[in-house]
Amino acid sequence: MTATAPQVTPGRLYGVGVGPGDPDLVTVKAARLIAEADVVAFPVARRASRGGVAREIARPHMRDGVVELPLLYPVTVEGTDHPGGYEGALVDYYDDSAAEIAVHLDAGRDVVVLCAGDPFFYGSYMYLHERLADRYVTEVVPGVTSFSASAAASGTPLAKRDDVVTILPGTLPPAVLTERLRDADAAVVMKLGRTFGQVTDAAEAAGVADRAVYVERASSPVERTCPLRDVDADTVPYMSLVLVPTGPGTFADEAPAGSAATGSGASGDGATVGAGTDADRAAVGVRTGRVDVVGLGPAGDDWRTPEAAAALESADVIVGYRTYVDRVPVRVGQRRLDSDNRVEIDRARQALELAAAGERVAVVSSGDPGIFAMAAAVYEVVDAEPDAFAAVDVRVVPGLSAMQVAAARVGAPLGHDFAVVSLSDILKPWDVVERRLAAAASSDLALALYNPASRTRREQLERALATLRRHRDPDTPVVVARAVGAREEAVTITTLAAVDPAVVDMRTILIVGSSRTRVMPGDGDGRPDRVYTPRSYPVG
């Protein structure tokens, strides 16, 4: 009879946070588990002369004879020849490391995986957890975070009362980082090293650099703290961060006695701080939401500014004409409220109401939002209903206008003084349009004409051209630019006498030259005609 080998009970997996650097900041529970472990695993760079940051922190708590399992990290600051690039190298690293740990767990040995800081706060352990926790009994032991230690080391309280602390990786796109820093009550920027230059630039652009504090290797023997502006970028290690504490005047207990910050009927201990009106909330630094009116550019992501992209990314809600909302990249958790193009005032009011309730709203427009678009509609509602919306912060984020792109397609027809007129008579009488056209034409201004015609508005364009022909030479250059930036883009150069209204619709911009506008003929070999208006003008 063959004896059956006893079945081995798998070991337990522990993800243990060892804190920011000081072995005395390792929690009692973490120290006990490290001392009792059969195997202690830890990440270590291939070029490291010692056992890695986490292992050095835990070393005083490790017992003699414990099995040490270094997990050799494939890349740090150097490049990689892995066929999958950096991401591929990391996937293989965590797969291989999980397999090494599993060997010990399957043999019945308890494994403690060390992680600097906290395992689930930008910690390397979390990727091993994803691969092993469904197969083994697992426990995660939190650790003191690096930003907690950094705040203590620098004597920098981060936030009070209702302030919100925002944690940001320095690897974010610069425009997004700037936007988040500008809007945060208080912030922590991690993952520095090579990103430090762009983090500093973002802090300056956001207006928070003067109160930002740099902390390096907090709680370790080589800890360093100083103002952000005093740091040499070439000396910054990865194990460092930037603290942006709450700005002056936003701490509730700094408000003078009897001010709105304590509220009427306050008990004196601040129990009712933040209740009441928008003014009360503003006194303690609580944001009531914001409306960003964002220009998407005429078409395509290539013409969207980084500032616009950041505003869209940070918005809780996207509001706009459905055609424009569809151009905004979808983000999980972000709401999208679209509507018809003829309800601009209703759309503006909806955005302001959301912002007054605390939401961050992006109202989107094609081209530039301040040119025949939503920015004016939003301000019109604010002006008409000041009691409801005066406290809402409204910001206009400019975009590349359709007339700029149309002009660039043919050269520089708007190179000298020009006027911009909408031919739509929906919101203004046609006689006003005609008077403005006549005044601009008689003043010898180049003209950019928006909203020239629609399916139901055809007569207006004919009348506009007749007005211009009374003041301009028939050979005046005219640029007809339809759907600029889209796949169906069509741009032609013609004259005031020859322009064909039949090819013009609401997606068309017309640029009518002045008496000085010139057409430079192409060479017939692929180089097209060019149009420009000289910057000089004859005297007399």
Image (cartoon, rainbow, N blue to C red):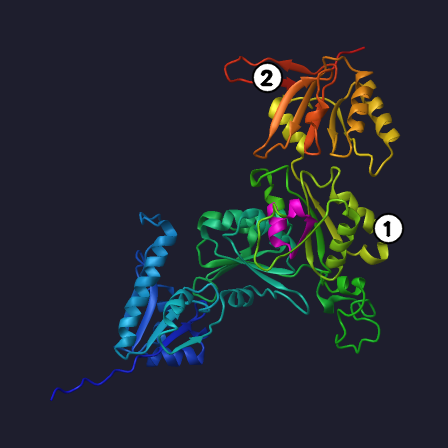
Q: Which mark is residue 535?
A: none
Residue type, mark 1 in image: Ala
Bin the neighbour count of mark 2 within 10 Å (Cα to Cα): few under 14, some 14-19, many 20 and up: some
Q: Position of residue 410 (x, y in %)?
A: 61, 22
Bin the neighbour count of mark 1 within 10 Å (Cα to Cα): few under 14, some 14-19, many 20 and up: few
The reply to whether callout 1 and callout 2 are in contact (CB within 8 Å) is no
Q: Secondary structure at mark 2?
A: loop
Residue 487 or residue 245, whichever sits in front: 487
Q: Position of residue 535 (x, y in %)?
A: 69, 19
Q: Quadrant of residue 307?
A: top right
Taking the magenta stretch, the answer to whether it contains residue 268 is no
Q: Which quadrant of the rendered structure holds the C terminus? A: top right
Residue 32 left/right relative to 356: left
Q: Position of residue 482 (x, y in %)?
A: 65, 30
Q: Which mark is residue 529?
A: 2
Furthest toward the top, the residue is 540
Residue 313 left/right relative to 161: left
Q: Which residue is mark 1?
A: 384
Going from N to C along the chain, the mark reached first, 1 or 2, is 1
Q: Secondary structure at mark 1?
A: helix
The region drawn magenta spans 309-325
Which dot, 1 or 2, sits closer to the camera? 2
The residue that appears at 56% across and 14% down in the rendered structure is 522
Label 1, label 2: how far apart the Cα atoms are: 49 Å
